[in-house]
Image (tube, rainbow, N blue to C red):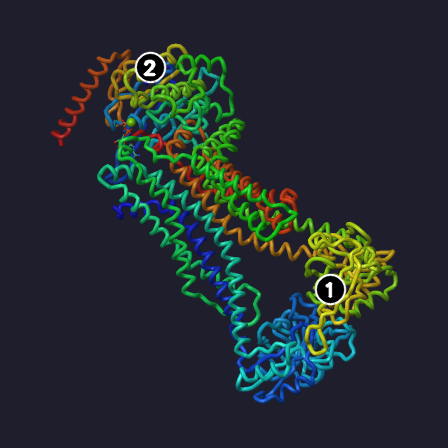
Amino acid sequence: MLRAMLRDLRAHLGRVAMTLAAIVLGVAFVVATWVVSDSAAATVRGGAQRTDLAALAQARTGDAVIPAGTVARLGALPGVSRAEGVVEGYAALVGRDGKLGTTSWPATAGTDWDPSQRFDLVAGRGPQHAGEVALEQQAAEEAGLSVGDPARVLLGGDRSDTATVVGVFAYRPAGREFDPAVAYDADTATRLLRPEGAPDGATSGSVPGFARVELFGADEQAVAAAARAELGAGFTVDPGAALRQEQADNAAEDGDIIRKALLAFAAVALLAGVFVIANTFNMLVTQRTRQFALLRAVGARRGQVRRAVLAESVVLGLVGATLGVALGVGLGLLAMRLLPVAGTVAYAVSPWAILLGYAVGLLVTVVSAYGSARRAARVSPMAALRTDAAVPRRSLVLRTALGLVAVAAGVALVALTSPEELTEPKRIQAMAGAVLAWFGVLLMAPVLALGVLRPLARVLRRGPVTRIAMRNAVRDPRRTAATASALMIGLSLVCAFSTVGETMTADLTSSVRAAVPQDAVLLRAAAFGQLDDTVRAKAAAVPGLSALAAPRTGELLVLPPRGRNAEARFTGLEPAGLGTALRPTVTSGSGDLRRGVLLDARFAADTGLRVGDTVRLRFGTAGKDGAVAPVEVSATVAGLHEGSDLLPGVLIDEALVPDGVDGWGDSVYAVGPDHGALRNALEQAFAQRPDVVVQDREQLLDDLLQAFQLVLGLVYVLLGAAVVIAVFGVVNTLALSVLERTRELGVFRALGASRTLVRRTVRRESVVISLYGGLLGIGAGVLLGGVMQYVILANPVFEMAVPWPTAGVALAGMALVGVLAALWPARRAARADILAAIAAE
Amino acid sequence: MTTFDAAVSAEDLTKRYGSGDAQVTALAGVTVAFGRGELTAIMGPSGSGKSTLMHCLAGLDTPTSGRVWLDGSGRDGAGRVELTGLRDDALTELRRDRMGFVFQAFNLLPTLTAWENITLPMDLAGRRADAAFADQVIDAVGLRDRLSHRPAQLSGGQQQRVACARALISRPDVIFADEPTGALDSRAGAEVLGFLRRSVDELHQTVVMVTHDPVAASYADRVLFLADGVIVDELREPSADRVLDRVRSLESVAHGGRVSAGAGA
Ligand SMILES: Nc1ncnc2c1ncn2[C@@H]1O[C@H](COP(=O)(O)OP(=O)(O)O)[C@@H](O)[C@H]1O
Ligand SMILES: [Mg+2]
């Protein structure tokens, strides 16, 4: 019997192919995910392990340094063969085109060359004296420089240096450490990267001392223990083994983050696949009703029929998984090849990836086919005797009821939270509610199809094409819904993310436009670097400038007169710049920093602070010995403001921020009476500084949004897999429907419907189903997005920004999907043999 | 050979299926004309080529050789058209505008109501049905209270009457009916046949009906007898008994013919 069924499956290869496509794509996505994350972890881990290091000492606070004397003392400790201070400082490599590279960290740090395993020469040799420099290979590649070229390097304190490239290296970090872009010989590095008496507040290395000390010796534990005793509490000392472990853990963690993110998308694709596969099996079973009835009539038990259908699904699952695993491994390796990774990429295909691929393929297929198998088993032997036999149809009542309950419960879960007190559990509750309601909509899709398409079918009476197409679409609402649901899954998530993106974009745009005057001219650090005080000083001296703000942000602890201490961010800037070059949205009190500090209104509400209160602000500064030395400042709350991305947290006069406080500043805002003149003047002043970019407000906005669009774009691409799978589902449904309607199509043709007309009818049905999926997806997606932005931003749910362009493109895309999906089925339908169709049995 | 006003005529129609040893000759040189305003029945044993002849006449099938004309003179000025050699689209249009069809079963599109099925050919042509005529036809088939029903909600006889109404409503040059009563009980069959008869008598329709039932054939003005792909006899003003007699004698002749052919070999 099984053999008979399998032969049957082979006879329907065409119909099975689309199901197979859905399985293959789903499995391939999962396997590719695994391969990419494994390979990424292996790449991070591979080749970068240091075996020479006994221990690494560094100050607990980021910017603190270790004085040279301490290094000498460490070198003299028992068991320590050598102590090497590592110099680190601001150094931005200028590319051939006179611009800074686009990468973030590597391009803006310099270090001193030493013969340790830190440096792995790729070309040339290490720098030996002034005038020579070695470049990190990715930085060199981006800058377009190689051995023999002159390289210009921007340094802290508005200086620069030009040296000949003598070597290119790959960097081996110890523990969590960023790769530097350039390396000088030790003396030159000390001179260039740690200028004596450089203005305070710049990057590390501006104060004499070393960022880290590398200790060498035979016994790692003994070396670490001795160093720890010598240095005291302000420093951490990690033995080499711990560093290697940390590095391996980091690599695995990075791989895991990639894996989890990608698996989420793979799960979405698989969910769409489940709908496609289930629907196909349903149709295959429906079409073979008489065959099942015959089997039953000649003595097959229900269990046998059910097992036969399940066996079919197992075979299909195995074939699909095999193809999917192969495709997935290929895709994963291809992705690793295409990723912009410097150095040697490690390719890792673990047995887990393959096992998982098979498990997923089998499980998804069998689970999807289970309902159909049960239905097939319920076919009565009597059906063999009737010509109009049908598989018993399940009622939609239970499914609809479940859907309604899910939607109601989901809405209730969201409604029970409020933007005012959106705590972490409440956020989770709201998100769970949204997901629940989303599943509810999925369950209600057949009923909604009837609700939406039936009235439409009644209204659209014009012309036989539309009428017949619409009627066919509502003929089996379950089938239409399953097909549309698969589309809805991918599309709704695209729309949800798009809604979040649109809302965040709108929020960011309005907050930037509120904070920055339209005619302001901006100086921004290139390549994610910082602007040091020399930039501000130089800008302030430019003619035609009336006010300037150079905010620096950091962390502090607010100690209110009553209640608990609260951590907050602060923004230090000059009082004259606030309200002129940068405008906070003051909600109460004064906006004048000379009168005191401005608190974020939400923070004030949380802590119960009011205008006029006196608070103490505790800043963490790095002491001379590298230990954290808190400094407290007392201040009056002059006013409250709406915190924004450009002006976050406690706004404070920069003069009140203690020396040595770690503050991040990458922008200077300037205004003057004549925008054009000011911009020209600033451009001129910084013509020789590729690390300083002169911009207008809208350019800043573009920059900020660009990163955002990039992430969204990636999300869309990943969700695309789900949509592609769903498109196969549409093709499948149409092809099988056309096959089912052979006789009908024959009569239609005999009565005078031309081939073109038949094609149009099928195409229109396809478009109707796709558009229904589109509408469902866009509707559910925008609402889901509404909740998501509520959860993320605490905006009210219905104050989301509806992404009209995305919705429009999605709808047009769905119409196109409908047309494309119908290509093959429509051609088949048009080629229907009239005589064969009307030949009475 | 015939001089009367013909709605459809065919000359030396041949149809062969397959090739080599497996070749079957379904039609072996049929020359025939169907009179305008007449109900002509085509009779013959199973496999004699009745359906094949009808399909070739209706342009649903292409004959291996021979020619077919549809003659619309006397109506709308539509002229004489040769079907053979026409392309699919042209044939489709002819079927839509100038022919009507009643098949043995599965005549209707299941998603359309009775009324929508009836007007489908007009709909496909983008024309509106003549309301007065439509009323007349609907009353004639007795379906006034069933117009908004789907085929699944109608009995077999009602479905067949809907098919008849559809065939008639565009006032085609000819209606082809292939065993229209084959799947019906005798009462429902009689209703359908009565309707076809009246459409000829009262509306001057031309009907070509394939059947193997002598009673059905007795409704016709003229009966053609087909055997082994050739027309072997013809009867005017038939009664069921005369048809039955003729069928019997034909069967014995065929039998005898075969025997004598065998003897001659
Ligand atoms: N598509 C076909 N392929 C091969 N032979 C066919 C085909 N259609 C009909 N025939 C053969 O042609 C002959 C006439 O068939 P048909 O016209 O259907 O006969 P009738 O309708 O009188 O029963 C039969 O022998 C039949 O087997
Ligand atoms: Mg026949």
Residue A422 place in picture, x, y as percent: 62, 50
Ligand 2 quadrant in view: top left
Residue at mark 1: A666
Figure check: A18 above or below A256: above
Residue A491 can be seen in this image: no
**Badge 2 residue CB within 8 Å of ligand 2:** no
Q: Position of residue B62 (x, y in %)?
A: 36, 32
Identify the secondary structure beneath mark 1.
loop
Foreground pick, A839 / A252:
A252
Dot 1 amino acid type? Asp
Asked if both marks, 1 and 2, belong to the same chain, the answer given is: no
On the rendered structure, is B237 left or right of B202?
A: left
Above or below, A449 against A325 in this view is above
Quadrant housing residue B177: top left
Q: Amino acid at mark 2?
A: Glu
Q: Nearer the viewer, mark 1 or mark 2?
A: 1
- For disc 2, the neighbor class at 10 Å (few under 14, some 14 to 19, many from 20) is some
Q: Nearer the viewer, residue B3 or A147?
A: A147
Closer to us: A417 or B165: A417
* Identity of the residue furthest to the front in this view: A562
> Given contact means CB atoms under 8 Å apart, are the residues at marks 1 and 2 in contact?
no
Front position in the image: A424 or A311: A424
> Does residue A676 appear to the left or right of A731 in the view shown?
right
Q: What residue is disc 2 on?
A: B191
Q: Is residue A663 visible?
A: yes
